[in-house]
Image (cartoon, helix red, strand yellow):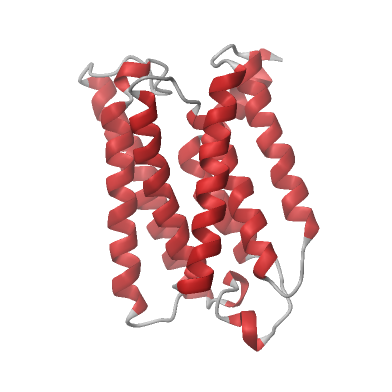
Amino acid sequence: MKFFFTFITWLFMPLSMPLIVLLVVMYTPTYLEFSTQTNSLFFLNNGVKLFLLRSFALFGFVFPVISILILKYSRQIDSLQLDNQRQRTVPLFLSGMYAIMLFTLLMRFQSQVSLSAHLFSLTVSGAIIAFVSLLINLRFKVSLHASGAGILLGFMFSYYMEQSLLVSWPIYMCSIVAGLIIASRIFLRKHTISELLIGFNIGFFVTFLTDYLFVLYF
């Protein structure tokens, strides 16, 4: 069981959540209606999808991971999973800044291709969660894995609320993944229940509310 939950911890890293979200919603069919076509990521051109996946992969995963590796090998942090509460400030700050850079890139790309509000909300919520977690973490250790699970479910609920076809299986699948993530942190004794709950609530409600508001007003 330890091997299984360790595998889950590494497979579903917090940084990988936006990519998993995009892969699910981009390739899950929804009905074509004029009112929702603009914000449905399924109807994007394949070339645009690849560009977006690469952009989110670079700014949301590759650059933060490289930064963490640099911090690890320069001995500024002890663990790649950021187990030490005091050593999370710089990685969280950098993750927030990368999310802002990605938002800027999408804004420039918006002048060429009309993009869904969901894409912008995902980058903004990522920045907000990083900075909120940074501030809370100064006094209280927050589970970043649980925040990632919250991002996954928060976006799924908000996204499919707006689609003309409610596809239930991605929500069920992501709920199982979120449960496995949280169970792995409990089994490996990485966090207390309160740390997991705070992390999950930050990820879920920030992502859900940001996405909901972006769709309404962006």
Determine the residue positioned at 38% across, 25% down.
137
Quadrant in the picture for residue 165: bottom right
Name the spot of residue 170 as percent of width and height, x first: 73, 54
122 and 66: which is toward the camera: 122
149 to 209, vertically: above or below: above
Determine the residue positioned at 57% across, 25% down.
196
48 and 202: which is toward the camera: 202
Determine the residue positioned at 38% across, 59% down.
55
55 and 91: which is toward the camera: 91
Q: In this view, does 184 lie to the left or right of 133?
A: right
2 to 158, vertically: above or below: above
Determine the residue positioned at 61% across, 25% down.
7
Name the spot of residue 8 as percent of width and height, x first: 62, 28
Name the spot of residue 1 as percent of width and height, x first: 72, 15
Q: Can residue 56 be seen in this view?
A: yes
Q: Is residue 116 visible?
A: no
53 to 112, vertically: above or below: above
185 to 63, vertically: above or below: above
Q: In this view, does 3 lie to the left or right of 117?
A: right
Q: Is residue 169 left or right of residue 11?
A: right
